[in-house]
Every structure is written in structure tokens, then in C-alpha cells.
Image: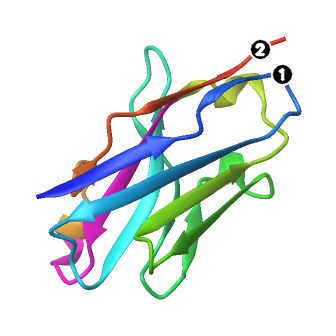
Amino acid sequence: QVQLVESGGGSVQPGGSLRLSCAASGNIFRTYTMGWYRQAPGKQRELVATITSAGRPKFADSVKGRFTISRDNAKNTVYLQMNNLAFEDTAVYYCNLRAELVPARLYESADFGSWGQGTQVTVSS
């Protein structure tokens, strides 16, 4: 069982910044990808950014150039630095951890892995 604890959400004005953190504990795999997904009201959950155990990042087109993702393997923690936030970034952000040594179709599955409780990010003026 893997536990994910998120922190860092909140309210910010457009153009502002926030930093999300997610710490993993429990039965963690040796190689795993960590990342962030978000769900806005009335919309499906979508990928925001992920980072593999090798440090390879992946971003949604909508956040490229504004968000960065990093991880501290010693702390089993992933960070999402969000800059130049916009109204459309408002959503509940969920941390995800997924094992890498699994079939590709499982690894790429939208719901695969362990999930955090979610943290609200609100961008408003």
C-alpha cells in the first residue's frame, strides 16, 4: 500500500505562483513515475506533468513553459512549480505514483497507480 500526502495548494491571482509537494510512503516500488493530474469542475481528470525514475519529465501542452516538475528520490517526494498561473489552471490537483516495470498499456492507463486525496488550486482575481 502506498500513501501520498499532498500540500501546497491554495488561492492565487492570475500570474501568480504556487508550489505543490507530494510525499510518498509505504510499499514503494524501486522504479516509479510520480506526477500530477488535475480535474476541473465538469471536466475529466487530465495529466499535468510527470517525471520518471530517470528524471524524464512530461508536460501537458497547456502548461509547458509555465510549470516545472522535479523529484527528490531520497525523500520520495515530487514537486510541481506552477508559474504564471491562469484562470484555466483552477482545479483539484492529484498526485500519482505508478510503477514503471509493468506492461505499457497498464502504465499508460489513465487511472493506474496510487492517488493522493487532491489539493485545490484556485486562480482568481
Q: Residue at x 80, y 58 (%)?
A: 65
Nearest the eye: 112 or 32 = 32
Amino acid carrying label 2: it is Ser
Looking at the figure, which quarter contains the N terminus? bottom left
Residue 12: x and y in percent read 77, 24
Residue 13's mark? Answer: 1
Q: Is residue 64 left or right of residue 99?
A: right
Instruction: Give the quarter of the image for residue 76.
Output: bottom left
Q: What amino acid is found at the position of numbered circle 1 in the picture?
A: Gln
Q: Position of residue 54 (x, y in %)?
A: 47, 88
- Pick the residue in front: 49 or 72: 72
Q: Nearer the viewer, residue 61 or 94?
A: 94
Q: Residues within 10 Å of mark 1 (few under 14, many from 20)?
A: some
Along the viewing direction, whichever of 36 and 64 lies nearer the viewer: 36
Task: Find numbered disc 2 in the image and state the secondary structure of the residue it sits on.
Answer: loop
Question: Left of 108 or right of it: where is 48?
Answer: right
In the picture of the structure, the residue carrying the numbered disc 2 is 124
Segment colored magenta: 92-105
Query: What residue sits 40% from the left and 33% below the top?
Result: 118
Contact check, label 1 and label 2, Cβ < 8 Å: yes
Check residue 27 for magenta coloring: no
Note whether residue 121 is visible.
Answer: yes
Secondary element under disc 1, as helix, strand or loop, is: loop
Q: Residue at x 24, y 52 (%)?
A: 3
95 is higher (above) or lower (below) than 102:
above
Q: Is residue 108 visible?
A: no
